[in-house]
Image (cartoon, rainbow, N blue to C red):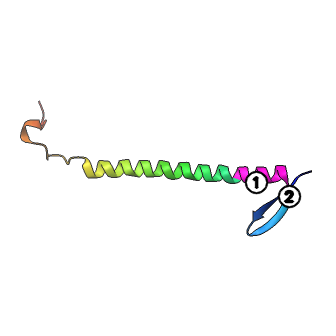
Amino acid sequence: MAKDVISINGEERVVREDTAKAYRGVNWALISIAAFILIAALMFFSGVLTNIIWDPQPGTAPPAERHEGP
């Protein structure tokens, strides 16, 4: 049976190859989920900041474009 070396908390351990692949797979899954959350948060906050910065305030439109009732 094939053996492989993985590092856990700085300690190298010799484990079976399938165990090492599963360990690396879990690490990649966690990194992928964290990256997805980070990218989604950056997109959300960039949209929020864009709306805060570029959204015109009420009453700043020229008088011809104001809609103040019927």
Dot 2 amino acid type: Val
Q: Main secondary structure of the magenta part?
A: helix
Asked if the stretch drawn in magenta spans residue 21, the answer is yes
| Label 1 vs 2, first from the N-terminus | 2
Q: Nearer the viewer, residue 52 or 40?
A: 40
Q: Measure the C-alpha gap from mark 1 to mark 2.
A: 10 Å
Q: Report the residue marked by disc 2.
A: 15
**Magenta residue span:** 16-26
Q: Counting other residues with Cα less than 10 Å from the Cα at mark 2, is it few (<14), some (14-19), or many (20 or more)?
A: some
Q: Is residue 42 left or right of residue 6?
A: left
Q: Is residue 68 left or right of residue 12?
A: left
Q: Are marks 1 and 2 in contact (CB under 8 Å)?
A: yes
Asked if the stretch drawn in magenta spans residue 20, the answer is yes
Q: Residue at x 30, y 48 (%)?
A: 51
Dot 1 amino acid type: Tyr
| SS at circle 2 | strand
Q: Position of residue 40 (x, y in %)?
A: 48, 48
